[in-house]
C-alpha cells in the first residue's frame, strides 16, 4: 500500500464516467494538430537541411541529435510547469490556447532557409530546431498526454480516449506526409524554399484552429488541489517501476519511428528512384487507423502489454518483408502497410499506459504528478528517441559515402536500405524484451484504482 499525501487530494467529479464522443473527438484534435506540424519536422527536416538548405548530412544529423538531447531537458521542466498550473480552465487544457500560435510560428520559422554562410546555416538550423521541435513542441505535447489521467479515472475510457487521440495523430501524420511534398512542389514551382514556406504557413493555421477547438471542448475532471513542487514531482518517480519500464521502452521505440519516417524519402528517392513515392509510403499511414481502432478490442481480450507486443510483432514482420521483395514497388508497399498497421498499435499503448503510472505514483507516494510523469514518459522519450532515430542513420549513411543529390554508390544504397528496413526490426525486438517486464504491474491496476477511490473518499 502507498502513502497518503495532501497532494493526492483530487476532485470527485471524474469517478468512472463515460466521456462524450464529441469530447473524445476534440481530444483527438490535439494530436492531429501536433502531428500535422511535428511529423513535418520529423519526416522532412533532415531532407530540408541536406537537399534544400544545403547543409551536409553529417552536420544535419548532429544538429538533430544535439538539439533533441538538449530539448529532452525541457520535458521535465514543462512537466513541472504543468503540475504547478491551476486555472479556471484546468491544469493542462490552458496550454492548448496559450501555445497554439507560438507552436505554429516556431515550426514555420524552422523551415525557412535564409541565405547565410555555411556556419550561419548550421546555427540558424540548430536554434530554430530547438525552438520548434523542442521547447515549444514539448509545451504542447506535455499537456496533451498529461490531461488523459485527468479526464476520467475509468481505465477503459482512458484507452478509448487515447485511441481517439492516436487516430487524430495518425490523420495529422497522413495529411502532412501525403501532401507536404506535393504542396511544396505546387507552391514552389521548382523553388523548394518558397514551397516549404507556404506549405508550413497553411499547416500552421490549421493547427491553430484545431488546438483552439480542443481547448473549448475538452475538460479536466480530476486535478490535484494544490501545486506540486518540483521536488515532489521527482518523488512520484520513486519506486515507480512501471514508469521506468515505459520510459526506457518508449525512448528506444522512437528510434525506429523517427528512422522509418526520416529514411522513407531517401529510400524512395535513391533506392526506388522517385522521391514522390514518399507520399505513397506516407498515405499508407491510414492503415494505422485500422490498427488503432482495434486497440480497445485487443486490450479487452488480452491486456495492454500483450496488445503492444502484438503490434511490435506485426511491425517487425512487415518491415522484414520489405527486404525480400526486391524493387517490386507493389510488394514493398504491401509490406510497408503491414509494418504501419503493427507500429500504430505498438505506439499507441505507452501513451495510455502512462496514465496508469500516474495512478501508480500516487498510490505509491501519495503524489499525483501527472505533468512530470507524462512529460518525461512522452515528450522526453519522443525527443531523445527521435534524435537518435535521425542521428544513427545519418552516421551510417555518412560512413557509407552518401552525398545528397548524386548517384549513390552500392554501399550507400545498402546503408539506406539497412536503416530503412532492418534498424526498426532490431528496435522492435529490443522493445518487446523490455515490455516483458510490465505485465505484473498491469495486474495491480484494479486494486490501485480501488485504493485510490477509497483514499479520495476519505479526504
Image (cartoon, rainbow, N blue to C red):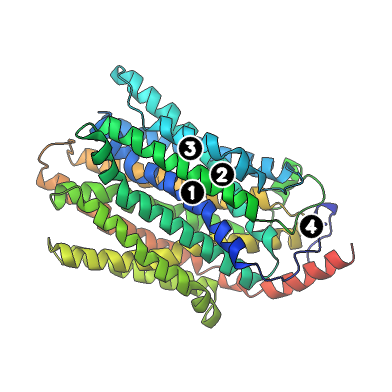
Residue 29 in the figure: left or right of residue 196: right
Q: Describe the element under mark 4 as helix, strand or loop.
A: loop
Residue under label 3, please give it.
Answer: 104
Q: Quadrant of the N terminus?
A: bottom right
Residue 387 lies left or right of residue 276; in this view the side is right
Kindly check if marks 4 and 2 are in contact, taking CB atoms under 8 A apart as contact. Answer: no
CA separation in Å, label 4 and label 2: 27 Å
Which mark is nearer the camera, 2 or 1? 1
Viewer can see residue 259: no
Who comes first in sequence, dot 3 or dot 1?
A: 1
The residue that label 2 is drawn on is 140
User: Distance of mark 2 from mark 3, alpha carbons?
Assistant: 11 Å
Q: Which residue is mark 1?
A: 33
Nearer to us of marks 2 and 3 is 3
The answer to which quarter of the image holds residue 125 is: top left
Indicate which disc residue 350 carries.
none
Q: Identify the secondary structure beneath mark 1.
A: helix
Image vertical order of residue 66 relative to residue 24, above or below: above
CB under 8 Å between discs 4 and 1:
no
Q: Earlier in the sequence, mark 4 or mark 1?
A: 1
Q: Residue at x 85, y 53 (%)?
A: 6
Q: In this figure, which residue is indicated by the disc labeled 4?
A: 366
Q: Position of residue 165 (x, y in %)?
A: 52, 60
Residue drawn 84% across the image and 59% down it = 4
> Mark 2 touching mark 1, by CB under 8 A?
yes
User: Residue 199 appears in which quarter of the rendering?
Assistant: top left
Residue 185, picture quadrant: top left
Amino acid at each position: 500500500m502507498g502513502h497518503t499525501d495532501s497532494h493526492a487530494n483530487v476532485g470527485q467529479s471524474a469517478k468512472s464516467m463515460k466521456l462524450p464522443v464529441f469530447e473524445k473527438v476534440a481530444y483527438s484534435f490535439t494530436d492531429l494538430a501536433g502531428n500535422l506540424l511535428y511529423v513535418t519536422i520529423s519526416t522532412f527536416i533532415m531532407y530540408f537541411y541536406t537537399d534544400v538548405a544545403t547543409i551536409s548530412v553529417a552536420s544535419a544529423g548532429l544538429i538533430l541529435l544535439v538539439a533533441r538531447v538538449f530539448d529532452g531537458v525541457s520535458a521535465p521542466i514543462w512537466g513541472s510547469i504543468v503540475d504547478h498550473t491551476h486555472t479556471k480552465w484546468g491544469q493542462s487544457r490552458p496550454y492548448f490556447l496559450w501555445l497554439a500560435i507560438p507552436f505554429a510560428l516556431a515550426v514555420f520559422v524552422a523551415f525557412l532557409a535564409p541565405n547565410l554562410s555555411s556556419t550561419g546555416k548550421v546555427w540558424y538550423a540548430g536554434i530554430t530546431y530547438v525552438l520548434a521541435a523542442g521547447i515549444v513542441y514539448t509545451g504542447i505535447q506535455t499537456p496533451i498526454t498529461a490531461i488523459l489521467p485527468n479526464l476520467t479515472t475509468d481505465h477503459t475510457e482512458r484507452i478509448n480516449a487515447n485511441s481517439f487521440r492516436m487516430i487524430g495523430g495518425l490523420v495529422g501524420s497522413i495529411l502532412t506526409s501525403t501532401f507536404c511534398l506535393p504542396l511544396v512542389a505546387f507552391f514552389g514551382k521548382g523553388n523548394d524554399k518558397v514551397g516549404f514556406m507556404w506549405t508550413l504557413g497553411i499547416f500552421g493555421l490549421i493547427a491553430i484552429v484545431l488546438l483552439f477547438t480542443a481547448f473549448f471542448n475538452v475538460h479536466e475532471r480530476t486535478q490535484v488541489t494544490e501545486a506540486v513542487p518540483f521536488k515532489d514531482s521527482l518523488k512520484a518517480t520513486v519506486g515507480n517501476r512501471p514508469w521506468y519500464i515505459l520510459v526506457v521502452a518508449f525512448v528506444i521505440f522512437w528510434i525506429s519511428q523517427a528512422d522509418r519516417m526520416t529514411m522513407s524519402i531517401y529510400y524512395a528517392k535513391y533506392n526506388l528512384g522517385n522521391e514522390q513515392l514518399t507520399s505513397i509510403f506516407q498515405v499508407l499511414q491510414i492503415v494505422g487507423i485500422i490498427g488503432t481502432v482495434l486497440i480497445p478490442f485487443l486490450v479487452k481480450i488480452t491486456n495492454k502489454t500483450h496488445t503492444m507486443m502484438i503490434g511490435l510483432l506485426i511491425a517487425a514482420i512487415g518491415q522484414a518483408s520489405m527486404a525480400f521483395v526486391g524493387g517490386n514497388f507493389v510488394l514493398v508497399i504491401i509490406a510497408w502497410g503491414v509494418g504501419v498497421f503493427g507500429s500504430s498499435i505498438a505506439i499507441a499503448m505507452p501513451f495510455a499506459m502512462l496514465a496508469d503510472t500516474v495512478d501508480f505514483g500516487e498510490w505509491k507516494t501519495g503524489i499525483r504528478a501527472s505533468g512530470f510523469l507524462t512529460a518525461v514518459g512522452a515528450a522526453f522519450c519522443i525527443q531523445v528517441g527521435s534524435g537518435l532515430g535521425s542521428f544513427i542513420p545519418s552516421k551510417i549513411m555518412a560512413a557509407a559515402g552518401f552525398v545528397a543529390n548524386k548517384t549513390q554508390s552500392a554501399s550507400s544504397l545498402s546503408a539506406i536500405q539497412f536503416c530503412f528496413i532492418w534498424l526498426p526490426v532490431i528496435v522492435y525486438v529490443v522493445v518487446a524484451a523490455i515490455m516483458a517486464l510490465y505485465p505484473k504491474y498491469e495486474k495491480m491496476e484494479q486494486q490501485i484504482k480501488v485504493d485510490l477511490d477509497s483514499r479520495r473518499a476519505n479526504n
